[in-house]
Amino acid sequence: MYLWSSHAKTWTPSKVRAYPRLVVVPISRSVTLSSNMQQFRTNNPYEKQFGYSRAVRKGPFIFVSGTTSLDPDSGELRHPGSAYDQAKATFDEIVRAVTALGGTKSDIVRVRMFVAKDEDTGRVGDALRDALGGVGPAATMIVGARFVSSEMLVEIEADAVVL
């Protein structure tokens, strides 16, 4: 396996064991992070109570906090009893946060879905497909999560990169 050396501007043999499907590609563009961080906040009562942001942007990176189907204005849970509808509303809120920080839905590169019940995994997966299927982000689903309310069935985090 060969690795790109930016110092020598050449490909050099690596002492690391080569894996059959691993390809190392040189990065053609460097990204400099500024010292400024943009924040996106909603009226979600937990954001104010615990002092965090719904999402933050640092340079080209956007990180969206664990998001549920709580209405961002009233703080009321939307769609109790429906994992699909909660997940769909959550993805919509995530896209809203990413957009507010200068990104788009297609900039979302990773999602982490936390689901309360085994039987809801298919419906949450359907919501991912319906909300972001054309984007195809990396995705992780963890089952057996407990949330601040027993009516919450889904919580989702997301990361985006805006280039």
Image (cartoon, rainbow, N blue to C red):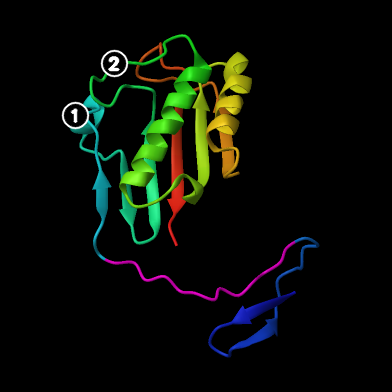
User: In the image, is residue 28 part of the stretch drawn in magenta?
Assistant: yes
Span colored in magenta: 22-34
Q: Position of residue 98 (x, y in %)?
A: 38, 45
Residue at screen point 23% across, 24% down: 73
Is residue 100 visible to the viewer in this orientation of the structure? yes
Q: Position of residue 119 (x, y in %)?
A: 61, 14
Between residues 80 and 107, which one lies in front from this camera angle? 107
Q: Are marks 2 and 1 in contact (CB under 8 Å)?
A: no
Give residue 137's mark.
none
3 lies left or right of 52:
right
Between residues 110 and 133, which one lies in front from this camera angle? 133
Per the image, the residue denoted by label 2 is 76
Element class at badge 1 = helix
Three-letter amino acid code at disc 2? Glu
Query: Taken as a whole, is the magenta stretch helix, strand or loop?
Result: loop
Residue that extends furthest to the bottom in the rendered view of this protein: 8
67 lies left or right of 118:
left
Residue at screen point 50% across, 28% down: 114
Residue at screen point 77% across, 60% down: 21
Residue at screen point 25% across, 65% down: 35
Residue 22 vertical position relative to residue 81 in the rendered view, above or below:
below
| Count of numbered circles in the view | 2
Give residue 49's mark.
1
Residue 107 vertical position relative to residue 126 in the rendered view, above or below:
below
Distance CA(mark 2)–CA(mark 1): 15 Å
Q: Position of residue 110 (x, y in %)?
A: 52, 45
Crowding near the residue tagged with mark 1, few <14, some 14–19, many ≥20 C-alpha atoms within 10 Å: few
81 lies left or right of 96:
right
**Quadrant of the snapshot with the C terminus:** bottom left
Circle nearer the N terminus (2, 1): 1
Three-letter amino acid code at disc 1? Gln
